[in-house]
């Protein structure tokens, strides 16, 4: 089996979700939408805050035409020239051709923290998506610059909760529960009526919104701890953007489904009745990850039929019935540890992004590890980072030019940092 998703797409194009996947991502940079891959059918908002302010077709022609061998050679020699002044971060879901050059590989928060161990690195090149580069910028020091090789690498889930929609929803929620949206006050019990919780996969503006209003950020590893923290301080939570992570976490904490209505920002009161809202404990934003939405209970049944005794682990961004049917669920890091703890000969079906699953399979050749989804469909926005963009931003740095810097405005960064610090201080009970 070829180890790279790109190789597999080229070898078996009929088994991938888009015939355009083998093309260079620069073919799609100037187009609306997310390009080929798992998010391609999602409507992209006109102003995509997590995608940067514009989506120029910016990769110089020379880099589009270059052979991959030359791109890799350029990346290697630029890394050598920049030495300790550079750190390259690669997300678990990033393609292998890019990950091979990363100094650290991990999830978004692990990577932002890894960058902190490199204070001499003036440039942090984040091979991930826009909200991740923003978080790294918020957590890094003032004399460090964060670079996202392709500005069109956003996140369709993060884009489902834009700042305006969340602000509007908050005003409606405040009106219903009778509090000041700018300055919610605790009641006689010392609890806020509603507390906003945002998943790490959201724009810096929304992290700042949470910081400003007594709220907090969570990751897929600490969502339960964060929700416990929130319920010590509030009667209910507005959880965004991922409904599935919110629902799966709250359900595991014993919250009944009828107490977690969905908030659809396009509908009055989010599409709920007054009774729904009165009994709500968690208001779930109508967002989802297009990669994890692809996993189904049928796929789990088929895996078990084909490999009796196989174990199934899925990411908590998968729909609730999928998480319920799996043997385990957990963050990317938890999935990695689950595989690490398995034994030679074990068969493990994994419900998360194909690049990560494929890499785990290559790292543990003595086990049968495969993606639950038989169709090769990478995260379309992660896939926008191609070695061509990495070579270009690194060559530019060597030449003294900074391309695609992600810089969060200071006021936003300060407020977002408050919500991130609350998350770091939240301890499991
Ligand atoms: S895998 Fe899903 S949540 Fe992660 S970057 Fe891609 S679209 Fe966003």
Image (tube, rainbow, N blue to C red):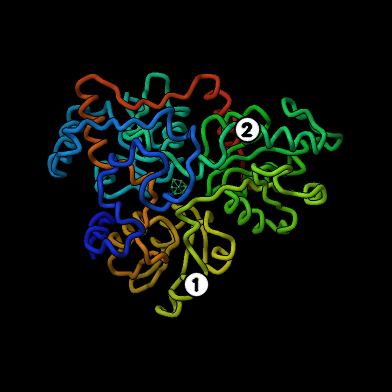
Q: Position of residue 250 (x, y in %)?
A: 66, 54
Q: Secondary structure at mark 1?
A: helix
Residue 322 falls in which quadrant of the image?
Answer: bottom right
Report the Cα–Cα distance between label 1 and label 2.
37 Å
Depth check, front residue: 86 or 387: 387
Locate residue 140, reporting x and y percent: 43, 27
Circle 2: element type? helix
In the image, the residue with mark 2 has its CB under 8 Å from the nearest atom of ligand 1:
no
Viewer-proximal residue among 98 and 42: 42
Q: Is mark 1 within 8 Å of ligand 1?
A: no
Instruction: Name the residue tied to disc 1.
Output: 298
129 sits left or right of 318 in the view: left
Mark 1 and mark 2 residues within 8 Å of each other at the beta carbon: no
Mark 1 or mark 2: which comes first in sequence? Answer: 2
Above-or-below relation of 355 to 226: below
Q: Dot 1: few (<14), some (14–19), or many (≥20) neighbours within 10 Å?
A: few
* Residue assigned mark 2: 210
**Quadrant of the image containing the N terminus:** bottom left
Residue ID at (43%, 57%): 352
The residue that appears at 46% across and 36% down in the rendered structure is: 131
Q: Nearer the viewer, residue 310 or 207?
A: 207
Q: Quadrant of residue 309?
A: bottom left
| Residue at the right extreme of this rendering | 188
Return the x and y of residue 253 as percentages of the image width and height: 67, 56
Q: Dot 2: few (<14), some (14–19), or many (≥20) neighbours within 10 Å?
A: many
Q: Residue at x 38, y 72 (%)?
A: 347
Labels 1, 2: front one: 1
């Amino acid at each position: 089996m070829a180890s790279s998703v790109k190789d597999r797409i080229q070898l078996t194009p009929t088994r991938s979700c888009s015939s355009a996947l083998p093309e260079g991502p620069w073919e799609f940079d100037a187009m609306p939408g997310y390009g080929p891959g798992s998010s391609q059918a999602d409507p992209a908002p006109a102003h995509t805050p997590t995608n940067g302010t514009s989506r120029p077709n910016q990769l110089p022609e020379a880099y589009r035409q270059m052979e991959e061998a030359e791109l890799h050679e350029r990346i290697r020699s630029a890394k050598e020239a920049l030495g300790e002044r550079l750190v390259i971060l690669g997300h678990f879901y990033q393609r292998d051709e890019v990950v091979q050059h990363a100094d650290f590989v991990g999830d978004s928060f692990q990577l932002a923290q890894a960058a902190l161990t490199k204070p001499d690195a003036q440039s942090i090149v984040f091979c991930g998506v826009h909200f991740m580069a923003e978080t790294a910028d918020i957590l890094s020091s003032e004399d460090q610059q964060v670079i996202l090789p392709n500005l069109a690498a956003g996140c369709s889930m993060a884009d489902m909760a834009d700042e305006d929609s969340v602000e509007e929803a908050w005003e409606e929620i405040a009106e219903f529960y009778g509090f000041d949206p700018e300055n919610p006050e605790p009641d006689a019990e010392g609890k806020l009526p509603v507390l906003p919780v945002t998943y790490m996969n959201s724009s810096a503006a929304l992290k700042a919104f949470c910081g400003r209003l007594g709220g907090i950020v969570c990751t897929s590893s600490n969502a339960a701890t964060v929700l416990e923290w929130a319920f010590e301080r509030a009667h209910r939570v507005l959880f965004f953007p991922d409904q599935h992570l919110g629902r799966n976490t709250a359900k595991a904490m014993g919250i009944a489904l009828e107490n977690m209505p969905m908030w659809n920002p396009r509908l009055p009161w989010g599409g709920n009745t007054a009774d729904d809202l009165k009994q709500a404990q968690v208001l779930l934003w109508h967002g989802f990850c297009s990669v994890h939405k692809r996993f189904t209970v049928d796929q789990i049944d088929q895996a078990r039929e084909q490999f009796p005794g196989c174990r199934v682990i899925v990411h908590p961004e998968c729909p609730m019935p999928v998480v319920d049917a799996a043997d385990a669920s957990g963050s990317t890091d938890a999935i990695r540890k689950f595989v690490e703890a398995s034994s030679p000969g074990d068969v493990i079906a994994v419900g998360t992004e194909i690049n990560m699953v494929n890499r785990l399979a290559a790292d543990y050749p003595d086990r049968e590890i495969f993606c639950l989804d038989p169709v090769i469909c990478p995260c379309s926005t992660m896939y926008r980072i191609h070695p061509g963009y990495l070579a270009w931003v690194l060559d530019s740095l060597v030449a003294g030019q900074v391309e695609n810097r992600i810089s969060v405005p200071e006021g936003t960064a300060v407020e977002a940092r408050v919500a991130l610090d609350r998350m770091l201080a939240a301890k499991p009970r």
